[in-house]
């Protein structure tokens, strides 16, 4: 994918995970600010999905690479919401740490999308 958007989403996901790590260290539960940050990452991931859908016609994604690409993008759309539901339902330090893992997984998914996309 062309442009800086994948890198922005990757860095934002890592920053999100770092902020959640501070929440875990301070034994705080997620709040509206953290939910808003996750919402921005989700919106950017959705834009990435739309951009990939538009640009996919002009690139060679043979074999299972097309399915892999969109599988990663769709997984990226559900990681943070699932992490949030878990962390808000349980309200413990461990559940907040699950949200941090979701942020790291989001960064990994975007990295894999960039690796699958042809240069």
Image (spheres, helix red, strand yellow):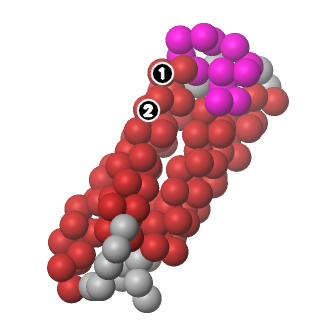
Residue 51: x and y in percent read 25, 68
The residue closer to the viewer here, 83 or 15, is 83
The answer to whether any part of residue 55 appears in the image is yes
The answer to whether any part of residue 5 appears in the image is no
Residue 19 occupies quadrant: top right
Above or below — where is 48 with respect to 23? below
Residue 60 occupies quadrant: bottom left
Q: Which residue is rendered at x = 46% and y = 66% of the image?
A: 113
The residue closer to the viewer here, 118 or 76, is 118
* Location of the N terminus (image quadrant): bottom left
Q: Which residue is rendered at x = 63% and y = 54% of the image?
A: 14
Residue 77: x and y in percent read 38, 45
Please tell me the numbered disc located at residue 85: 1
- SS assignment at label 1: helix
Residue 59: x and y in percent read 27, 85
Above or below — where is 49 with respect to 81? below
Query: Answer yes or no: do the residues labelled 2 and 1 have beta carbons within 8 Å?
Result: yes
The secondary structure making up most of the magenta span is helix
Q: Which residues are magenta?
A: 87-98
Q: Residue 90 in magenta?
A: yes
Please tell me the numbered disc located at residue 81: 2
């Amino acid at each position: 994918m062309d442009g800086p958007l994948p890198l922005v989403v990757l860095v934002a996901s890592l920053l999100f995970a770092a902020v959640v790590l501070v929440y875990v260290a301070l034994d705080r539960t997620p709040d509206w600010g953290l939910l808003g940050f996750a919402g921005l990452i989700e919106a950017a991931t959705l834009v990435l999905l739309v951009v990939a859908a538009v640009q996919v016609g002009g690139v060679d994604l043979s074999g299972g690479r097309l399915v892999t690409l969109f599988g990663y993008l769709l997984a990226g759309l559900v990681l943070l919401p699932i992490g949030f539901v878990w962390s808000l339902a349980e309200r413990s330090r461990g559940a907040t740490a699950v949200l941090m893992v979701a942020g790291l997984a989001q960064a990994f998914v975007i990295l894999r999308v960039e690796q699958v996309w042809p240069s």
